[in-house]
Amino acid sequence: MDWREVIENPSLRNLPFKIETNEWGQIVMTPATVRHCKYQGLIIEWFHRLGEWGRVFPELGIQTSDGVKVADVVWGTEEFFKRNKGDIPYFVESPEIVVEVKSASNTVEEMESKKGLYFEKGAREVWFCDKEGDMHFFNIHGRLSRSELFKEFPRHIDIDFI
């Protein structure tokens, strides 16, 4: 299936899963836990606090060489969103920052693969939030001690108070 067929399919519309495709057009579904959603929400809150010069959104699809991947959180400049507007089913380029929250079902290889795919599509940074809430920041050259675009972004997200 192509991505438009996936998102318009009424039988797939209300599933409690993150839906992506792979390079062969097969549907890949991953369930999201409450913990996963809490991390997404708090990451979005931090972007709202620190990123007034751009926009943040959850669950946006990015067409990659390995199918459409749905990033947990993306942040892009207003220029990015001006270039990528209209009724499009997914982005053909990556926003400046792509964040993936690691799920129990994610492997290290899968996360590394997604990171490479996002950089191929133009991401400036890719961030991972692990299951303990530790943030891992990367640019095209490798691991960073903290984000270069958001120097004040915390290295740890605490969901225990929620």
Image (spheres, grey):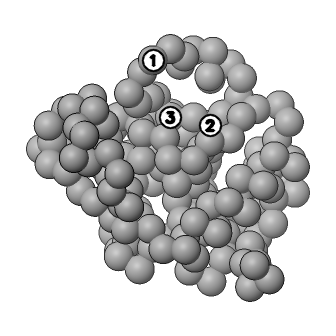
As displayed, is residue 97 above or below residue 46? above
Instruction: Mark 1: give few (<14), some (14-19) or many (20+) Cα within 10 Å.
Output: few
Q: Which residue is drawn at 75% across and 78% down?
A: 162
Q: What residue type is labelled 1?
A: Asp
Whether residue 35 is visible here, answered yes or no, is yes
In the displayed structure image, the side of residue 128 where residue 10 appears, left or right: left
Q: Mark 3 points at which residue?
A: 94
In the rendered image, residue 2, in percent from the top left (x then y), is placed at 19, 32
Q: Provide the secondary structure element on which disc 2 rests.
A: loop
Q: Residue 96 carries which label?
A: 2
In the displayed structure image, the side of residue 51 where residue 111 appears, left or right: left
Instruction: State the separation of the CA atoms marked 2 and 3.
Output: 6 Å
Q: Residue at x 45, y 17 (%)?
A: 87
Q: Write down the quadrant of residue 25 in the picture.
A: top left
Instruction: State the separation of the CA atoms marked 1 and 3.
Output: 17 Å
As displayed, is residue 55 above or below residue 131? above
Instruction: State the separation of the CA atoms marked 2 and 1.
Output: 20 Å
Which mark is nearer the camera, 1 or 3? 1
Q: Which residue is drawn at 21% across and 32% down?
A: 5
Q: Which amino acid does label 2 sit on?
A: Glu
Which of disc 3 and disc 1 is earlier in sequence? 1
As displayed, is residue 108 above or below residue 13? below
Q: Considering depth in this image, is 103 or 148 the residue closer to the camera?
A: 103
Are dots 2 and 3 in contact, CB under 8 Å?
Answer: yes
Q: Which residue is drawn at 71% across and 53% down?
A: 44
In the displayed structure image, the side of residue 76 where residue 84 appears, left or right: left
Q: Mark 1 points at which residue?
A: 87
Q: Write down the quadrant of residue 107 in the picture.
A: bottom left
